[in-house]
Amino acid sequence: MAVYSRREVAILLLLERGDSYLNTHDLSGATPLELAVQSGYEGIVGLLKAAQTHYSGPTGAGSSTLAGY
């Protein structure tokens, strides 16, 4: 997972492709957000939380791009 690389740019590129990255799991079943929290990667946690909010939004529908992030 890109979280392991600790590169926010890589995470942003994956998120711009769509929300499917948010729902991936590693071999232990952890999501990118769980891994970032466990590892203390605050910047990445912020990106992933913003993406979750963007994609779920108040109506559950988001756009397919994160240009504003």
Image (cartoon, rainbow, N blue to C red):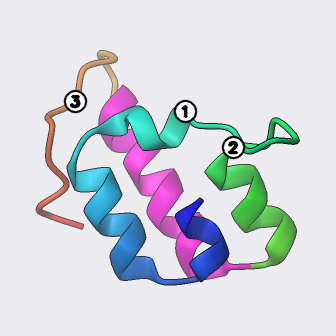
In the image, residue 29 sits, relative to residue 2, either above or below, namely: above
Query: Callout 1: few (<14), some (14-19), or many (20+) C-alpha neighbours within 10 Å?
Result: few
Q: Earlier in the sequence, mark 3 or mark 2?
A: 2
Residue displayed at 81% across by 41% down: 27
Q: What amino acid does circle 1 point to?
A: Asn
Q: Secondary structure at mark 3?
A: loop
Residue with the mark numbered 2: 31
Residue 3 in percent (x, y) is at 60, 68
For the residues bearing labels 1 and 2, Cβ distance under 8 angstroms: yes
Residue 21 in percent (x, y) is at 45, 43
Q: Quadrant of residue 53?
A: top left
Frontmost residue, 48 versus 17? 17
Residue 7 in percent (x, y) is at 48, 83
Q: What amino acid does circle 2 point to?
A: Thr
Q: Secondary structure at mark 2?
A: loop
**Residue 58 forms part of the magenta stretch:** no
Q: Quadrant of residue 36?
A: bottom right
Magenta segment: 41-56
- Alpha carbon separation for disc pair 1 and 2: 6 Å
Residue with the mark numbered 1: 23
Identify the image quadrant of the C terminus: bottom left
